[in-house]
């Protein structure tokens, strides 16, 4: 196929693809602080690239990314894991020291918007809708999982919640999956949009990266296993490369392709 991007396809191309491979991908993620060295669009940009990579293998088309996401205030335990006192009111990655605030949407508006887009796609005959999310905010994951389950149960389309990030099992030793603006996300951006990465915006490597100063977080910290010093171990300054980013993207794509193929087989069996 000439392109998988829905916005660049002509009507007859869309009709032909829908008849043979009725799969549509919807990448989602907020514009969100990702440290001083990365752009705000990491999550939706990675989700878009992962969706395009998956569509190349499964067929189907990719809707332009929905630059929308949501997040919540951290619990006292989570705040202490990050190195805060525990009584602060901090939403997502919007730490007090950041120079720019994220654009987190109200959860109800986020969920209603995603649901509306999925409903439109299902009504237009796409039988598998893959929601590809680059953002792991608790309430975003819950909302997408709920939407996928409810619309699938109602019988309109098979809606999948797909993660555009890796868990630790997909990574080399020393890396933890599910981190934020850490070596993994930095590597992905070095592969996808190298011009947007500026490692020199971080302090020199003899200075540890404290979570509270930079809002750069290891996956292990999100899982309640922070480093004692409350500093970043999957250090983007030491452990990032475009080659790693390419490998991570391939691993993410493989996971999504497996999910979508399974849903397509279930439909073929109808
Ligand atoms: Zn991210």
Image (cartoon, rainbow, N blue to C red):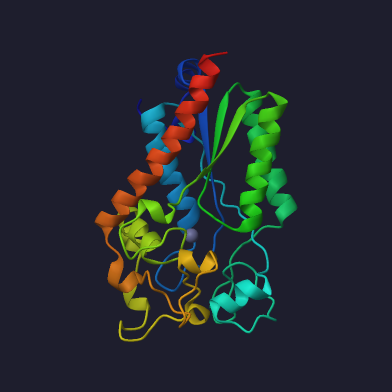
The answer to whether any part of residue 8 appears in the image is yes
Residue at the extreme left of the image, as rendered: 243
Residue at the extreme right of the image, as rendered: 108
> Height in image: 173 above or below 262?
below
Task: Compare residues 138 and 64 and report the one nearer the observer.
Answer: 138
Residue at 63%, 84% (x, y): give it: 85
Q: Is residue 124 left or right of residue 39?
A: right
> Height in image: 251 above or below 76?
above
Q: Is residue 101 left or right of residue 134?
A: right
Q: Is residue 247 left or right of residue 76?
A: left
Residue 22 in percent (x, y) is at: 51, 22
Residue at 71%, 35% (x, y): give it: 150
Disc tally is 0
Residue 13 in percent (x, y) is at: 44, 21
Residue at 53%, 66% (x, y): give it: 222
The answer to whether any part of residue 180 appears in the image is no
Task: Compare residues 192 and 265 and report the one nearer the observer.
Answer: 265
Residue at 46%, 24% (x, y): give it: 10
Residue at the extreme top of the image, as rendered: 270
Quadrant location of the N terminus in the rendered image = top left
Task: Compare residues 100 and 245 and report the one nearer the observer.
Answer: 245
> Height in image: 56 above or below 67?
above
Quadrant location of the C terminus in the rendered image = top right
Find residue 196 and report its image quarter. bottom left
Residue 81 in percent (x, y) is at: 56, 75
Residue 144 in percent (x, y) is at: 63, 45
């Amino acid at each position: 196929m000439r392109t998988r991007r829905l916005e660049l396809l002509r009507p007859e191309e869309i009709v032909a693809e829908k008849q043979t491979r009725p799969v549509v991908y919807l990448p989602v993620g907020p514009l969100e602080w990702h440290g001083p060295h990365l752009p705000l669009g990491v999550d939706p940009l990675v989700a878009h690239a992962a969706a395009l990579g998956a569509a190349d293998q499964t067929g189907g088309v990719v809707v332009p990314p929905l630059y929308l996401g949501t997040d919540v205030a951290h619990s006292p335990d989570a705040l202490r894991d990050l190195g805060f006192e525990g009584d602060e009111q901090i939403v997502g990655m919007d730490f007090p020291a950041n120079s720019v605030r994220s654009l987190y949407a109200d959860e109800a508006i986020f969920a209603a918007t995603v649901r509306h887009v999925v409903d439109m796609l299902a009504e237009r005959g796409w039988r598998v809708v893959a929601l590809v999310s680059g953002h792991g905010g608790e309430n975003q994951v819950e909302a997408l999982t709920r939407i996928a389950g409810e619309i699938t149960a109602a019988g309109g389309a098979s809606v999948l919640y797909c993660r555009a990030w890796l868990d630790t099992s997909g990574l080399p030793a020393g890396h933890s999956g599910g981190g934020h603006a850490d070596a993994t996300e930095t590597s992905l951006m070095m592969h996808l949009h190298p011009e947007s990465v500026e490692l020199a915006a971080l302090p020199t490597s003899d200075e540890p990266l404290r979570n509270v100063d930079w809002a750069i977080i290891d996956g292990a910290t999100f899982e309640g296993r922070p480093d004692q010093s409350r500093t970043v171990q999957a250090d983007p300054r030491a452990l990032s490369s475009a080659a790693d980013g390419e490998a991570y993207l391939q691993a993410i794509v493989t996971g999504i392709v497996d999910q979508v193929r399974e849903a397509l087989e279930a439909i073929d069996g109808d």
